[in-house]
Amino acid sequence: MNAEAPRAGSGRAPDIFRRGGWMPMRGYGLDEEVDFAIVGAGAGGATLACRLAECGFSVVVLEAGPFWRPLEDFASDELEQQKLYWTDERIIGGHDPIALGGNNSGRGVGGSTVHFSMISLRFRPEWFQCRTRLGYGYDWPVSYEDMAPFYEQAEQALHISGPVSYPWGPKRRRYPYREHEMNASGLVLARGAEKLGVAWASTPLATVSAPAGRSPPCVYRGFCNFGCTTNAKQSALVAWIPRAIRAGAEIRDMAMVGRIDLDAHARVAGLHYYREGRWRFQKAKNVVVAGYAIETPRLLLNSACPQFPQGLANSSGLVGTHLTTHAGPGVWGCFDEEIRWYKGPPNMAVCEHWNYADTGKDFHGGYAFMSQGPLPRAWAQNVATARYLWGEPLRREMMKYNHMAGLVPVAETEPRLENRVDLMEETDQYGLRIPRVTFSYSENDKRLQRHAVDFMRQVLLAAGGRDLWVSDDTSHILGTCRMGNDAQTSVVNADGRSWDIPNLWICDGSLFPTCGGVNPSLTIQALALRMASRIGTLASCGEL
């Protein structure tokens, strides 16, 4: 079956746990005014859709990419699996342009969680008030105490496999599933960290270490970043979408949303989307934009209208601004013993020491770093681009593959006005203006990365590594529609609700006022769970 043709519709959706299987799905008419139309089926959109549907709201989710069938569509082939990434044309600029594609965007139901590395870490509590408590960045409009119950809900739903006792952060209940057995690459991090006297831990991962519902335990095949063929990975496609459908939500795949329309009272009336060769219009009482940190501001800006000529939700002028990313300069070394780092999930050990230590550094912010497990094609690309090797020199270096190990940080960057997403005049295949993504590191960002590289060098040397070298990279993109307590300095309030248009909401990583030094997926899902809870409360009080 062609994954590029819509699969969901006519009263059914793919059953991802059965080859060729289907599950019943409710359908809504275009003239039927649904309670919520959600743009995007990734970490934010899928989670919110599930909980809203379970609360009794009528929900339609519009996803630009395919409704994947992992048991059939996913191959143990790095090149084939490039289809999971959003690679539509975008313009990048700034002094440090961000590479877009596989490491920060996804195309299809489940979004980038289909190919994420499953790292599921909570934010350090102080980060939610980092301006007040740590002296940098911006305070969030929610606290750790607000978020803690929703973090726990997300961890339970995702069946997170993690250690009984995690060394950092407040005391908490143990993870739902036992930690995975450590691979050799993770043991390199452990050995080096112990020699330097810093803590390390098994990484909490959203892939199950024992059967969970219809998901089998992880078989450690190592293709996590290219799509899990067994459904052990608890992506949004696995964890939230089937629940959402069973609760009455409709998922429309291959549906590219191009514009949000307003009524005469400057409230959202619905949205235009392209599916099966033509533009259609879905009526909705509320629209939630969950397209992530590039497509979300792009849609808001492309929806400019006479009431809001600068774009929707943009009276503050902040839509698209304060883009952040996670810097990821890697340090790599060769070891005498065989590591065979492709075995198991790619990031099995973690050190968060520099997320929680506030002394002994010349920068503000933090970073975690993890052991690595790149597959051969991805590793060859890294070696070729970082060390400018080709031909026979590249072949010789690749012969060391089974003896290599490395560390990569999730390194915080500062939210700054000049780092932004805006629109070009050029248009894409849908006639929509394409985004321009501009990014440059601050001096603090550069100091933080130098510190991370130096410390990771020490860890690898202490573990017995030699011939060390460094590569540059970035990963997650966040922060272009930030939440806050003041309409003048933020795009939405603490509930993700637009200050300007009360029935327009945002639910994805673009909400983040700061990016912290950990992977964002768990926090995005916790925010979505909190938003669903708040919407239920507002509805019961007649405040929607």
Image: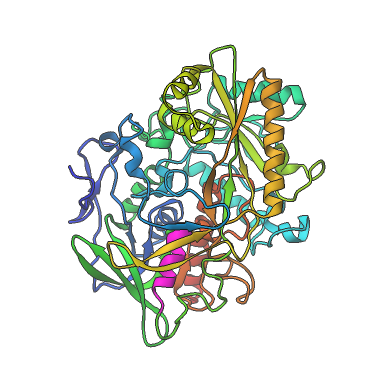
In this orientation, which residue lies closer to the viewer: 132 or 88?
Answer: 88
For the magenta stretch, what is the residue range? 293-304
The question of residue 302 being in magenta is answered with yes
Q: Is residue 290 visible?
A: no
307 lies above or below 126: below
300 lies above or below 150: below
Residue sitting at x 30%, y 36%: 80
In this orientation, which residue lies closer to the viewer: 313 or 399?
Answer: 399
Residue at far top of view = 337
Residue sitting at x 35%, y 71%: 259
In this orientation, which residue lies closer to the viewer: 461 or 366?
Answer: 461
Where is residue 242 shown, x and y percent of the image?
A: 34, 47
49 lies above or below 372: below
Where is residue 289 shown, x and y percent of the image?
A: 43, 64
In this orientation, which residue lies closer to the viewer: 203 or 369?
Answer: 369
Where is residue 43 shown, x and y percent of the image?
A: 45, 51
Residue at far bottom of view = 264
The image quadrant of residue 55 is bottom left
- Left/right placement of residue 21 relative to residue 65 reads left
Q: In which quarter of the image is the N terminus?
A: top left
Residue sitting at x 64%, y 30%: 201
Where is residue 84 shown, x and y percent of the image?
A: 35, 44
Residue sitting at x 19%, y 45%: 2
The question of residue 232 being in magenta is answered with no
Residue at far right of view = 359
How is the protein colored in the picture? rainbow
Query: How many marks overall?
Result: 0
Magenta span: chief secondary structure: helix
Q: Can residue 244 be seen in this view?
A: yes
